[in-house]
Image (tube, rainbow, N blue to C red):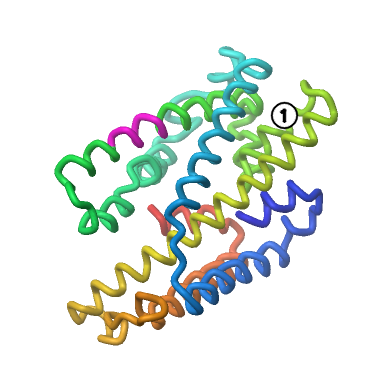
Amino acid sequence: FLPHYLGTAVGVEALSDSPWDVVIAVAVIVGIAGVRLARHSDLHAAGIAVAGLDLATQLLLVILGLALLFSPDLLTQGMSLGSVPTWSDLAFALPLAMLAYTGLETVANLAEETREPGRTLPRSLFSALGLVVVLTALIAVVGLSAFPVENGETALGEEWLKAPLAGIVAALQGSLPGWLGDGLRVYVGLTGALVLFAAATTSITGFTRLAHSLGEHRQLPRRFGRLNRRTLVSPYAIVAAAVVSSALVVATSALADDVLFLASLYS
């Protein structure tokens, strides 16, 4: 998904098409793993900055969307619960929403490093839950106002499936001065790419934490549980994360509905 936001920002459509989106995605994964193998980097401050930038970007889109695109009538246009969307679609979406909103895997990764887990973890979890749920719901309202359901489909799930925030920007451009619309497109594209880059970095780090724990308990080969002075985790875990992730990207690119497959895997 990162190349689709990057292609939107720089105005190069080829980055969003096969095979270049796959090439760039694999290159990003390999690059992250290479840097991680070379040295351990403290990205705590950068991670907080990226998260803040992401929230600010979505809040900006919500404000502009509610001011320029919002229409209550469009929110339910073409929808009939049980048929559009179907009950099976709703059942498929629920675990995805639960994982996306709660971030339980992040909490689990950081629990043993927290000084006061009994107080810190519930507070951080519920504050994040409230903020993310409200902001995501508002983004959905703006998205449906920009691309209402027609014939059981919305452009956010078709044309803009791999870069939905870029789709909202495209809808906003018709109501903004040219220079402001172009600036917003570049900003959201670059921000989206940066956030996804940070997410990939965090995922690889989370993989190495889990692999270390499994290696210590002999649920993976012992080498995965051995720490390294330079990387602070097992180099084997870093390489394994890069190989598995790259293989998934390449393999799913051959499927007709790669996004559905990845979402199913995540769910």
Residue 219, by quadrant, is bottom left
Locate residue 2, reporting x and y percent. Answer: 62, 55
Locate residue 131, reporting x and y percent. Answer: 40, 30
The image shows residue 173, relative to residue 197, as above or below, that is above
Residue nearest the observer in this picture, 246 or 64: 64
What's the magenta region?
126-132
Circle 1: element type: helix
In the rendered image, residue 137 lying in the magenta stretch gets the answer: no
The image shows residue 129, relative to residue 245, as above or below, that is above
Which quadrant of the rendered structure holds the N terminus?
Answer: bottom right
What is the residue that sits farthest to the right in this orientation? Answer: 178
Hey, what amino acid is under mark 1?
Answer: Ala
Residue 165, by quadrant, is top right
Give the residue at mark 1.
171
Q: Relative to residue 126, is residue 86 drawn left or right?
A: right
What is the residue that sits farthest to the left in this orientation? Answer: 118
